[in-house]
Amino acid sequence: MVLDALIKIKNEVDPSPTFRRSCREGICGSCAMNIDGCNGLACLTKISSDSVSTITPLPHMFVIKDLVVDMTNFYNQYKSIEPWLKRKTPAPTPGKEIPQSKSDKAKLDGMYECILCACCSTSCPSYWWNPESYLGPAALLHANRWIMDSRDEHTLERLDAVNDEFKLYRCHTILNCSRACPKGFNPGKLRTSSAWRWRLEPALCSVVYQSILLTLILEDQ
């Protein structure tokens, strides 16, 4: 794997190259970088035996040193969607977890497993152009994850928080994010799927939400 080669170079050839790495098993997301023009995890990317590989930092990020980029803005955007369970009523059984059916849990598959490696967001042209205001695929994926969670009771508040022409609507479904995800998730698909109906009845939505819902319903026909 590419990460093995980088570690060997650092240990045996030149100790100066700097890069992030931790689990070496595609779990932590630390070793995200651009390899031969595609974002990915160095620990999961095989070394080509037919050509020389070109390795660069994740694109359109401030570089701290070598392959290490500044993730501050990325993490701040993730924090802004408040990625934790928010309740208005106490748990059914104090001190116990809140139950969830298998079918409701299945709705979260492909979202909660995101490892926040930033491969998707840094492959998105809309994110390159509006990194300060557009939340990007990763943050929007997690926003949807909490909106779709049957245990969360702040759906409307979460909707209002992302209902912004830059936070959400800078997504133009280019789908680079889906191609770049090392876990095989499809954050771009959420923008055009029935999942973006947010489990809301049109009567509860603003005129903007109603128009979005109608468009999505017609697309699904």
Image: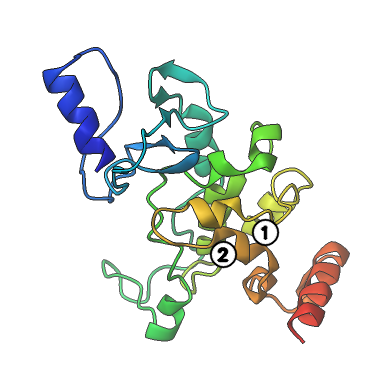
> As shown in the figure, which amino acid type bears the numbered disc 2?
Ile
Residue lying at the far left of the rendered structure: 12
Q: Are marks 2 and 1 in contact (CB under 8 Å)?
A: yes
Q: Position of residue 147 (x, y in %)?
A: 56, 64
Label 1: state its secondary structure. Answer: helix
Which mark, by number, is residue 147?
A: 2
Q: Position of residue 96 (x, y in %)?
A: 27, 70
Q: Earlier in the sequence, mark 2 or mark 1?
A: 2
Instruction: Identify the residue at horizontal 20%, vertical 14% (top origin).
Output: 14
Would residue 65 be found to the left or right of residue 38 on screen?
Answer: left
Instruction: Identify the residue at horizontal 29%, vertical 29% (top origin).
Output: 20
Instruction: Please tell me how many numbered marks the rendered image carries.
Output: 2
Q: Which residue is mark 1?
A: 159
Between residue 148 and residue 190, name the one nearer to us. Answer: 190
For label 1, the crowd category at 10 Å Cα-Cα, with few meaning under 14, some 14 to 19 and many 20 or more, is some
Q: Quadrant of residue 7?
A: top left
Residue 130 in view of the camera:
no
> As shown in the figure, which amino acid type bears the numbered disc 1?
Leu
Residue 31 in view of the camera:
yes
Q: Between marks 2 and 1, how big is the CA–CA gap? A: 8 Å
Task: Indicate the quadrant containing the C terminus: top left, top right, bottom left or bottom right.
Answer: bottom right
Compared with 129, 216 (above or below) is below
Would residue 131 be found to the left or right of residue 38 on screen?
Answer: right
Q: Position of residue 49 (x, y in %)?
A: 28, 43
Q: Position of residue 178 (x, y in %)?
A: 54, 57
For label 2, the crowd category at 10 Å Cα-Cα, with few meaning under 14, some 14 to 19 and many 20 or more, is many
Between residue 44 and residue 119, name the one nearer to us. Answer: 44
Label 2: state its secondary structure. Answer: helix
Instruction: Identify the residue at horizontal 22%, vertical 50% (top origin).
Output: 25
